[in-house]
Image: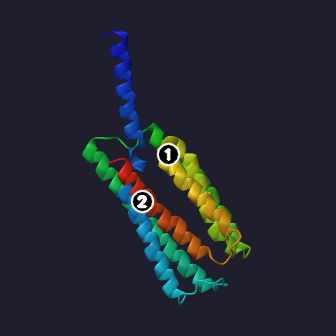
Amino acid sequence: MNKEEHLASLKEIKDLMNKSSKFMSLNGWAGILSGLYACIAAVAAYVYLDFTIKPRYFSTEDDLTIGAIGLITLLLALATGAISSRMRAKKNGFQIWDDTAKQGLLHLAVPLIVGFFFCAALYKYNLEGLIAPATLIFYGLALFSASHFTFKEVKHLAFIQLALGTISLFFIGYGLLFWTLGFGIAHILYGIIVKRTYK
């Protein structure tokens, strides 16, 4: 085997590893469905709040109800992403849980865990108005951190979340609206772009 054949073989192995490592994030349907879940959750929250979009202070009961809706939405999105990625990986013969995937998950998890405790502190000290911006900002930081192990579209999604979170800092009380844009509409657009780009 000559030098050119060696290089070609190495390139083929590298391409296969990249496909395998990045496969888990490359799921357009999961992004679309996660965005739809978020939009449905937002509608449910608006109905619960009598379609009040203007700034207002919520009661503890309101906070717990919206928190429960958000938690259910998050669990549905995670389950959809995991099941969909596993099915596609199995169908295409890819391994989705390799060293690169573990590193990506670690880089995603650290900002999210820190953000969770940061938001818990905001709630404890009656700074609920900052929770919506904080969740978008920490989620954007998590996506940006993990984007080094996946495709460029994730980094674009990260910038959108960071921008929305930063803007919402100046519109306290409109958190539900910014959540809808960030976790709903942005994810749907991300999913559509991924599906069109990587068929």
Residue 31 shows which numbered tag?
2
Give the Cα separation between the discs numbered 1 and 2: 15 Å
Q: Residue at x 54, y 65 (%)?
A: 182
Q: Are marks 1 and 2 in contact (CB under 8 Å)?
A: no
- Residue 79 in sight here: no
Identify the mark nearer the N-term, 1 or 2: 2
> Mark 1 against mark 2, which lies toward the viewer?
1
Residue located farthest toward the bottom when viewing the structure as drawn: 50
Dividing the picture into quadrants, the one containing residue 36 is bottom left
**From this viewpoint, which residue is outermost toward the right?**
125
Above/below status of 72 relative to 148: below
Residue 62 seen anywhere in this rendered image of the structure: yes
Q: Amino acid at mark 1?
A: Lys
Three-letter code for the amino acid on which mark 2 is drawn: Gly
Q: Position of residue 34 (x, y in %)?
A: 42, 64
Answer with the quarter of the image where residue 188 lies: bottom left
Q: Tag 2: Cα neighbours inside 10 Å, few (<14), some, or many (≥20)?
A: many
Residue 152 got which mark? 1
Whether residue 87 is situated above or below residue 93 in the rendered picture: below
- Residue occupying the point 54% across, 78% down: 66
Is 31 in front, or is 77? 31
Task: Tell me if mark 1 has few (under 14), some (14-19) or many (20+) residues whose alpha carbon lies within 10 angstroms of its own.
Answer: few
